[in-house]
Amino acid sequence: FEDEGLLVIDKPAGVAVHGGSGVSFGVIEQLRMARPQARFLELVHRLDRETSGILLVAKKRSVLKHLQEQFRERTTGKTYLALVAGQWPQKLKVLDKSLHKYLLPDGERRVKVVPREHPDAMPSLSLVKVARQSSAYSLLEVTIKTGRTHQIRIHLASEGMAIVGDDKYGDFALNKSLQRATERVPLRRMFLHAWRLQFKHPTSGAAMQLQAELPAELAQFLDHVLPDAS
């Protein structure tokens, strides 16, 4: 989607949204290079490098401020598709767990669940709905009410059901086996996709609902492991 104040892209996995942390060139730098005439291009929010899907870019400062205010006030609707190994309990619909960011010795960011009374605890809320399921895998629609770093990844992993392909919080043995070339349909990335985004248009006030379908590699893997799922 694009108009005079807003640009929405379907970010591929493996691309950082901006330079930094060992990456010199991200989505926003590529956009600025591709559009040298643009006076203003700024990210409204962020996605992990390994996550694909909807990403908002503001073309005006007023649009940026308006949209970031909606994100801060939690009036937007952000829903992701995530695949986990195992059968997610249908009754487990609310994950209300405080998170804490920390750094590994090499400087890489990580997040963990901590008690609410932890001095650096950040309240974090995810709503989970089972979309398709078998005894081996569950496709989840996860709507986040807060936008913490790695929130969905650590919330699901803390229930013992990490996202398939997650190289930070996942089942490393399973991930390695799914990557093998001998697999009929291998999975070589994390199965997390920013699928649907709802917000008010910053200038017209109209209700917007944008949707980015699963990338081909995720759709093929899903059909392979959940062909006849309920």
Image (cartoon, rainbow, N blue to C red):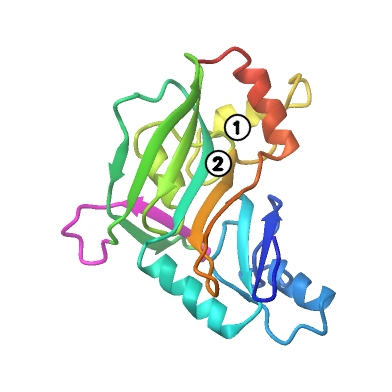
Q: Nearer the viewer, residue 45 or 64?
A: 64
Q: Where is residue 185 drawn, in percent x and y?
A: 74, 23
Q: Residue furthest left?
A: 117
- Whether residue 187 is visible, yes or no, is no
Mark 1 lies on residue = 175
CA gap, disc 1 and disc 2: 7 Å
How many C-alpha atoms fall within 10 Å of the one at disc 1: few (<14), some, or many (≥20)?
many
Q: Which residues are magenta?
A: 106-121
Say above or below: 153 vs 61.
Answer: above
Find residue 166 and name its label. Answer: 2
Asked if residue 157 lies left or right of residue 172, the reply is left
Q: Nearer the viewer, residue 222 or 9?
A: 9
**Three-letter amino acid code at disc 2?**
Asp
Q: Residue at x 59, y 38 (%)?
A: 191
**Three-letter amino acid code at disc 1?**
Asn
Split into 4 quadrants, where in the image is the N terminus?
bottom right
Asked if residue 55 lies left or right of residue 117, the reply is right
Q: Where is residue 161 drawn, in percent x and y?
A: 42, 31
